[in-house]
Structures are given as C-alpha cells and as structure tokens.
Amino acid sequence: KSSSDLPNCINPGRRLLGVRVPNSCFVRAVARQYGHALALTSANQSGDRSTVEVTEFLEIWDDCTLIFDGGKIPASGLGSTIVNLSVPGKYSIQRR
C-alpha cells in the first residue's frame, strides 16, 4: 500500500502501488547496476497493446528522461500478470 514514505507524484490518487519484476535479463541488469528500484511506466497507454521495441513509442520520447534500447522484446503483447499482495498473508490474481 502507498504510504507517506513515497512522494505523492509516484502514484497520485491511488491506494495501491504496483511493483514489476521483469522477465528481462537486460532490465534486471540495469536495475542491479543502478542499485535501487526504478520508477518507470509502460511505454503504452493503459489498455493499449504493449510495445516490444523503442520505435513503437516515438511520439513520447520527448517526455522520457532515459530510453534504453535493449532490442526487440519477445513478448505476446499481453499485459503483466498482476498479483494483489495488499492483504497480509493473502494474495489474489487481478490479471493473468
């Protein structure tokens, strides 16, 4: 759950905070090298098909602080599985 430990701009108006564990050696290596969690967003609008290469979101490049091109991501275009862990000792799958 969001708390006062996080700035409001991280997840404005939301009670829960999502944490993604990517199935990508490249992204995990970037996070490991940085040494901290990365605050980022998907390069697609909510509900749109996931992007799998950087050229698919050219229109938002100017709004990005950094863009890493790790090559085309082998993906199905489906969103990440979402597991709700907000209730201690319980979980529920929100999206597969």
Image (cartoon, rainbow, N blue to C red):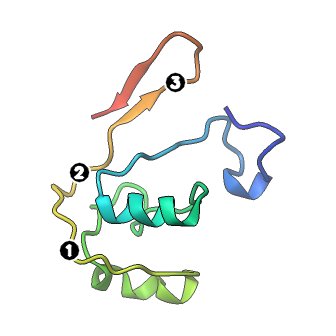
Task: Give whichever of 19, 92 is nearer the camera.
Answer: 19
Q: Residue at x 33, y 45 (%)?
A: 80
**Count of numbered circles on the image:** 3
Left or right, 85 with respect to 14, comes to left
Residue type pointed to by label 1: Lys
Disc 1: which residue? 72
Question: Alpha carbon of mark 2 to alpha carbon of mark 1: how far?
Answer: 15 Å
Question: Alpha carbon of mark 2 to alpha carbon of mark 3: how far?
Answer: 21 Å
Numbered tag placed on residue 18 in the rendering: none
Q: Earlier in the sequence, mark 2 or mark 1?
A: 1
Q: Residue at x 81, y 43 (%)?
A: 5
Q: Residue at x 32, y 81 (%)?
A: 54
Task: Give whichever of 13, 30 is nearer the camera.
Answer: 30
Circle 3 SS class: loop
Question: Alpha carbon of mark 1 to alpha carbon of mark 3: how far?
Answer: 31 Å
Q: Nearer the viewer, mark 2 or mark 1?
A: 1
Give the crowd class for mark 2: few <14, some 14-19, many >=20 residues within 10 Å: few
Left or right, 32 with respect to 49, comes to right
Q: Residue at x 43, y 62 (%)?
A: 42
Give the crowd class for mark 3: few <14, some 14-19, many >=20 residues within 10 Å: some
Left or right, 74 with respect to 96, comes to left
Q: Nearer the viewer, mark 2 or mark 3?
A: 3
Placement of 52 over or under 46, stated as above or below = below
Circle 2 SS class: loop
Q: CB under 8 Å between callouts 2 and 1? A: no
Quarter of the rendering containing residue 46: bottom left
Q: Quadrant of the N terminus?
A: top right
Numbered tag placed on residue 85 in the rendering: 3
Residue type pointed to by label 3: Leu
Disc 2: which residue? 78
